[in-house]
Image (cartoon, helix red, strand yellow):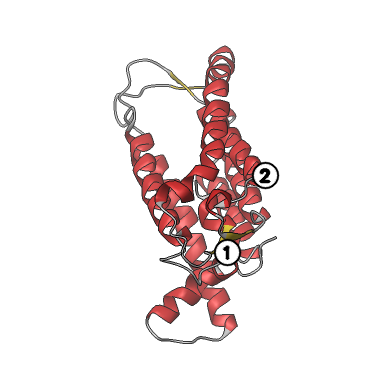
Amino acid sequence: MNSLLVALAVEAEPGIEATSVDVLSPYMWVFFVGFLVTFALTPIMRRLAVGNGIVDWPDLKRKNHTEPVPYLGGVAIFLGWLAGVFVCYFTTPHDQIGAASVLERFPAGIIVGALVIAITGLVDDVWGINPRAKLGGQLMAAGCLAYANVHTGLIVHLFNAVGVSAPPEIDYTLGAVLIAVLVLGGCNSVNLIDGLDGLAAGVVAIAAAGFLFISVQMASPGAAEDVSAATVFNDPV
């Protein structure tokens, strides 16, 4: 559902008040397609992992499970997310309430960055790579976001919130640093807490629910009538 954050530019018609259901309903196919693809691929990935010995062995220290746990679940999740992104290209937001909507293209930098992260994790699960190589892959993913100018709008909004106007060079530099910190921090924090069954998944689910709530608020014509995807992502690819 983070497509709501990157794909909507909404200007409501006079007299039309959109509810949360109105905002979310055009994206239900995004949810169902992503869920079904992930659900269908998970057992396939599990069989591949078990058959090829790509498993997480318990060490009775940080990894407290009693039996080997198959890897490759992230591949199923990534492909499910990618399927949801694909469906976004055929989604018209708010069409059922008559609001004038503009569907921005999903920034390619986000897709490429996610692909880099997925490949880095896959290589680490299958062959194992040193921490520096993993950090390099994560920084490369952050660079993809910076190249797509995903970060610039975030810094501009932060400065505007405190009444400060900074030159574009400052916005870009601070934005690149912020994105790098967020990508490295997000990837490694989830990786570090992934020692108990359901812990990482639960934390990510809570975070996703929070982003969904923020996205719905941003997509609400009453709450963000002047907000567009162009203000969040300066130059969607």
Residue placed most toward the observer, 12 or 219: 12
- What residue sits 41% from the left and 66% below the top? 223
Verify CB contact (< 8 Å) between mark 1 and mark 2. Answer: no
> What is the x, y in percent for residue 22?
47, 49
For residue 56, what is the image quadrant?
Answer: top left
Q: Residues within 10 Å of mark 1 (few under 14, many from 20)?
A: many
Which of labels 1 and 2 is toward the front? 2
Task: Label 2, secondary structure: give it.
Answer: loop
- Marks 1 and 2 sit apart, C-alpha to C-alpha, by 17 Å
> What is the x, y in percent for residue 89?
67, 47
Q: Residues within 10 Å of mark 2 (few under 14, many from 20)?
A: few
Mark found first going from the N terminus, 1 or 2: 2
> What is the x, y in percent for residue 138?
55, 51
- Disc 2 marks a residue whose amino acid type is Phe
Decide: is 4 above or below 30: below
Decide: is 87 above or below 215: above
> What is the x, y in percent for residue 61?
29, 29
Residue placed most toward the observer, 42 or 139: 42
- What residue sits 56% from the left and 36% below the top? 29
Whether residue 123 appears in this view of the structure is no
Task: Label 1, secondary structure: give it.
Answer: helix
195 left or right, relative to 231: left
Label 1 sits on residue? 229
- Disc 1 marks a residue whose amino acid type is Ala
Residue placed most toward the observer, 215 or 145: 215
Decide: is 142 above or below 66: below
Decide: is 93 above or below 199: below
Label ID, residue 74: none
- What residue sits 45% from the left and 61% below the top? 218
Whether residue 5 appears in this view of the structure is yes
Return the residue found at the far front: 15
Label ID, residue 90: 2
